[in-house]
């Protein structure tokens, strides 16, 4: 592997070995030279000096991790501080990754050098804490705003309805433009009412009405709605659910959360028009993972830039014209009220939102609903 030889020099080798970051070089034919012990750990493989192995021998070629590295090499993409959830052989950690184009003497690109910091799992604890704090702050803000808006809105609506009556009593030829104004005001008021309802849900969700239900049934009930939305956008839709244990859920609330995630997935793909070909693929998969039920909602949209993944659960964060930015905070609220968690994984293309619901919460919820 002469082309990877920019590090053949012993000084560089020493530098790579002593670095507290994993270093690997991925040649454009997808063979990897592992340059230090931490680089080997990134790929969950052993380390020997001058070790060159096909990338496919280290990571399964269908895995997200393989595809990130493969795309990086094919597109010769340089990243700085790319924050990724990294799973190899069942080991889950977070890594911070930089990549650099390495050129041959004639200027052509020989491959990519990847430098990655293993952040371990403490990040997920930190993130959970941040999420909880953010949810509390958001709820307070939402409650305040909803309260302030609701009263004047009721007054506006009342007076516009009076105006509507007055206009109805005018001669017919005078009614048309005034009626347009009134209709516009009423439809705008309705939009604000819709936002207030969302805010109230965020601030103070209605008391959960939990019943024992199966995630599979919930998805079956949602299927016609989803199919209608995906068909109209030329999006392929696949779903699969194992037979799973029953959970104590507020089914309507949980459906609301799922539909928000599904709408986001569809909206992310709706911009991706490919002539007559399907604009994208929406996949929903529910499975049991230890003591959790995991529901994955994946799309093949453009993904979420890493610098936005921290913001998407903030109230009013939106990148859409006409978006409000309340869908995800509401989902998070509903899922956390069920003692669950939402995680997002997006690696430069496509996005997966995973909802985790604990099986043990089903018992706890059952007891608390009986005692409450
Ligand atoms: N599947 C996805 N793919 C790409 N970006 C997404 C996806 N889901 C969410 N996002 C990003 O997160 C932002 C926040 O989503 P959220 O659902 O909270 O609000 P919204 O969809 O913009 O508006 P609304 O309040 O109508 O739901 C989106 O504007 C988008 O930038
Ligand atoms: Mg949304």
Image (tube, rainbow, N blue to C red):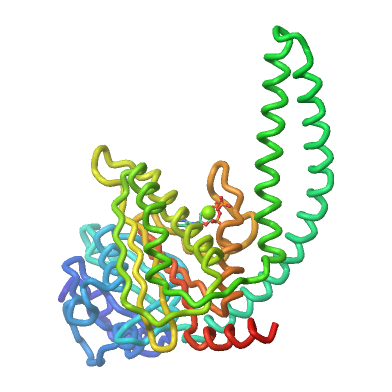
Residue 184, above or below 340: above
The quadrant where residue 169 appears: top right
Residue sitting nearer the eye, 336 or 158: 158
Locate the C terminus by quadrant.
bottom right
Q: Residue 57: percent from the left, percent from the top? A: 17, 81
Question: How many marks are shown on the rendered structure?
Answer: 0
Horizontal side, residue 340 vs residue 194: left or right = left
Residue 307 seen by the camera: no
Horizontal side, residue 350 vs residue 205: left or right = left
Identify the residue at horizontal 42%, vertical 72% (top origin): 215
The quadrant where residue 161 appears: top right
Residue 80 seen by the camera: yes
Locate the N terminus by quadrant.
bottom left
Identify the residue at horizontal 76%, vertical 54% (top origin): 146
Residue sitting nearer the eye, 25 or 217: 217
Residue 51, above or below 29: below
Horizontal side, residue 215 vs residue 207: left or right = left
């Amino acid at each position: 592997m002469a082309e990877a030889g920019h590090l053949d020099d012993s000084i560089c080798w020493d530098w790579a070995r002593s670095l507290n970051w994993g270093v690997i070089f991925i040649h454009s034919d997808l063979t990897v030279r592992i340059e230090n012990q931490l680089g080997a750990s990134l790929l969950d493989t052993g380390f020997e000096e001058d070790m060159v192995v096909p990338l496919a021998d280290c990571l399964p070629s269908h895995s997200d991790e393989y595809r990130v590295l493969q795309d990086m090499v094919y597109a010769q993409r340089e990243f700085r501080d790319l924050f990724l959830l990294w799973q190899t052989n069942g080991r889950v950690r977070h890594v911070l990754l930089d990549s650099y184009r390495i050129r041959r003497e004639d200027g052509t690109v020989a491959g990519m050098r990847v430098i990655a910091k293993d952040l371990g799992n403490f990040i997920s604890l930190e993130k959970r804490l941040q999420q909880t704090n953010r949810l509390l702050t958001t709820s307070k803000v939402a409650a305040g705003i909803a309260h302030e808006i609701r009263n004047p809105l009721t007054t506006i609506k009342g007076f516009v309805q009076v105006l509507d009556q007055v206009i109805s009593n005018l001669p017919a030829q005078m009614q048309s433009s005034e009626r347009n104004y009134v209709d516009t005001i009423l439809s705008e008021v309705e939009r604000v009412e819709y936002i207030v309802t969302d805010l109230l849900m965020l601030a103070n969700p209605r008391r959960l009405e939990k019943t024992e239900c199966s995630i599979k049934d919930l998805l079956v009930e949602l299927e016609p709605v989803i199919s209608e939305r995906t068909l109209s956008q030329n999006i392929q839709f696949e779903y699969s659910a194992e037979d799973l244990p029953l959970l104590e859920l507020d089914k309507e609330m949980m459906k609301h959360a799922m539909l928000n995630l599904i709408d986001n997935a569809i909206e992310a793909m709706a911009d991706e028009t490919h002539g007559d070909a399907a604009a994208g693929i929406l996949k929903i998969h529910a499975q049991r993972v230890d003591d959790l039920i995991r529901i994955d909602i994946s799309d093949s949209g453009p993904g979420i830039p890493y610098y936005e993944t921290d913001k998407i659960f903030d109230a009013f964060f939106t990148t859409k014209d006409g978006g409000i930015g309340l869908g995800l905070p509401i989902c998070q609220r509903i899922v956390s009220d069920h003692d669950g968690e939402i995680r997002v994984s997006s690696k430069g293309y496509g996005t997966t939102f995973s909802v985790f619901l604990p099986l043990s919460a089903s018992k706890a919820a059952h007891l608390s609903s009986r005692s409450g």
